[in-house]
Image: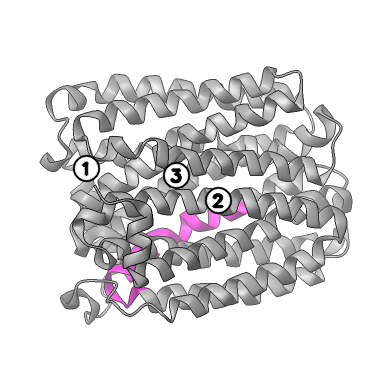
């Protein structure tokens, strides 16, 4: 089995793609952490912070069905380039967010960035199998998941510290620079990001083509199980909207505390894909492993809500996202293996769309309650929701696990 390091050393194209993603992910946190810390000060409550996170995921969900079709019809590298450059423009508008009356600009900017990410995500995920040899795919997914988590650690930590030390607006400038650098790295990718026969085809009937992908999913029970996996962690993801108040209200910390919570989330996301990489090479472990990882996420956040000390809450958040990051990497790998190239962008779009809708609803719910309900209670409820979904998913899919554990049968 190839190691992640050997894949990065040997393959310049995947190295450029993954480093571009890493830089882009890092830049994201120089937007979100400062916004989550200044919006409560500007508006006098936590609702706008939850609304920003909900817009970030909700806009992705709305655009993804069309974005997946585009990823299957046009050059995926070009799609990623345009998405990054659009995000640069959106970030620059955040310099106008100065008072409560201009807070709405943050929602518009984050919405535009989210729509750009909606085009970027299925294009990047669908491109990966075309940039690596089949025997390198598992290692590539492990390093991809870990890079996202690495930049979540670095970006959220630095974003929180920089927001506290120099203020939000220099952070926005750093984010714009990161996005521009990511676009430059994508220009270095030379290998085709899709099968030649797909690259030249014109976009046609996007809604019909999305329906084709949905039929493909629904007709295959194992594939349907994989596409519904990310909903578990997503439904509990509303807890992220409470991070600023966990840091400030529960533990008496400032923006640096918020950054540390997001950094702990990122550390877990780094460890999870690497720790669970062995599962990717054992198809019989895949679906049971997904069920265990969902339940682990829920249990860990229940414990976070009950933690008496910040020093205990941090490792529990990391543990939750060891499970969540492994869950994401396992389901992505399985989808890349079993879905044909011509459908891959649309299937990934459907997969991320469902997850994004669940995240958006969860964050809207937490955002609406965060000023009225105990923060600890909201965190426990978020974990319990994920745990309940995990149990239900396991009961519904156990016949799939029992009789069709080999993902090659999809």
Tag 1 near tag 3, CB within 8 Å: no
The residue where tag 3 is placed is 355
Q: Residues within 10 Å of mark 2 (few under 14, many from 20)?
A: many
Q: Secondary structure at mark 3?
A: helix
The CA span between labels 2 and 3 is: 21 Å
Spot occupied by residue 193 in the image (x, y as percentages of width and height): 29, 72
Q: Earlier in the sequence, mark 1 or mark 3?
A: 1
- Which of the two discs, 2 and 1, sits closer to the camera? 2
The residue where tag 2 is placed is 150
Q: Earlier in the sequence, mark 2 or mark 1?
A: 2
Q: Nearer the viewer, residue 2 or 369?
A: 2
The residue where tag 1 is placed is 218
The residue at the point 17 percent across, 39 percent down is: 407
- Which of the two discs, 2 and 3, sits closer to the camera? 2
Q: With 405 as the anchor, is 189 left or right in this view?
A: right
Q: Nearer the viewer, residue 247 or 68?
A: 247
Q: Residues within 10 Å of mark 3 (few under 14, many from 20)?
A: many
């Amino acid at each position: 089995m190839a190691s992640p390091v050997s894949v990065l050393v040997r393959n310049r194209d995947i190295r450029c793609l993954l480093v571009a993603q890493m830089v882009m992910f890092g830049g994201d946190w120089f937007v979100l952490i400062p916004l989550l810390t200044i919006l409560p000060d500007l508006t006098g409550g936590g609702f706008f912070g939850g609304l920003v996170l909900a817009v970030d995921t909700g806009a992705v969900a709305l655009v993804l069905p069309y974005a997946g079709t585009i990823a299957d019809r046009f050059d995926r590298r070009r799609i990623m380039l345009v998405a990054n450059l659009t995000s640069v423009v959106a970030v620059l508008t955040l310099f106008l967010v100065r008072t409560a009356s201009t807070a709405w600009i943050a929602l518009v900017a984050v919405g535009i960035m989210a729509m750009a990410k909606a085009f970027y995500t299925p294009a990047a995920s669908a491109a990966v199998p075309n940039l690596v040899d089949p025997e390198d795919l598992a290692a590539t997914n492990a390093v991809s998941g870990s890079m996202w988590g690495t930049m979540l650690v670095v970006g959220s930590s630095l974003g929180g510290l920089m927001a506290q030390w120099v203020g939000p607006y220099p952070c926005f400038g750093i984010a714009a620079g990161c996005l521009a650098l990511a676009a430059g790295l994508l220009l270095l990718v030379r290998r085709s990001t899709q099968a030649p026969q797909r690259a030249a085809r014109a976009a046609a009937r996007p809604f019909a083509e999305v329906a084709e992908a949905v039929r493909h999913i629904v007709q295959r029970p194992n594939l349907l199980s994989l596409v519904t996996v990310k909903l578990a962690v997503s439904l509990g993801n509303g807890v992220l909207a409470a991070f600023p108040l966990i840091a400030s209200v529960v533990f008496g910390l400032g923006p640096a505390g918020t950054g540390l919570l997001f950094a702990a989330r990122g550390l877990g996301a780094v460890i999870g894909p690497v720790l669970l990489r062995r599962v990717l090479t054992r198809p019989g472990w895949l679906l049971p492993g997904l069920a265990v990882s969902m339940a682990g996420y829920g249990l860990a956040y229940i414990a976070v809500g009950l933690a008496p000390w910040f020093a205990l809450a941090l490792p529990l958040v990391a543990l939750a996202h060891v499970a969540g990051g492994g869950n994401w990497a396992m389901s992505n790998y399985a989808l890349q293996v079993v879905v044909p190239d011509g459908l891959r962008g649309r299937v990934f779009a459907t997969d991320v769309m469902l997850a994004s809708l669940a995240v958006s609803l969860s964050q809207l719910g937490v955002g609406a309650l965060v000023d009225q309900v105990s923060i600890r209670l909201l965190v426990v409820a978020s974990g319990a929701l994920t745990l309940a979904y995990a149990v239900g998913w396991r009961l519904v899919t156990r016949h799939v696990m029992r009789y069709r554990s080999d993902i090659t049968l999809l």
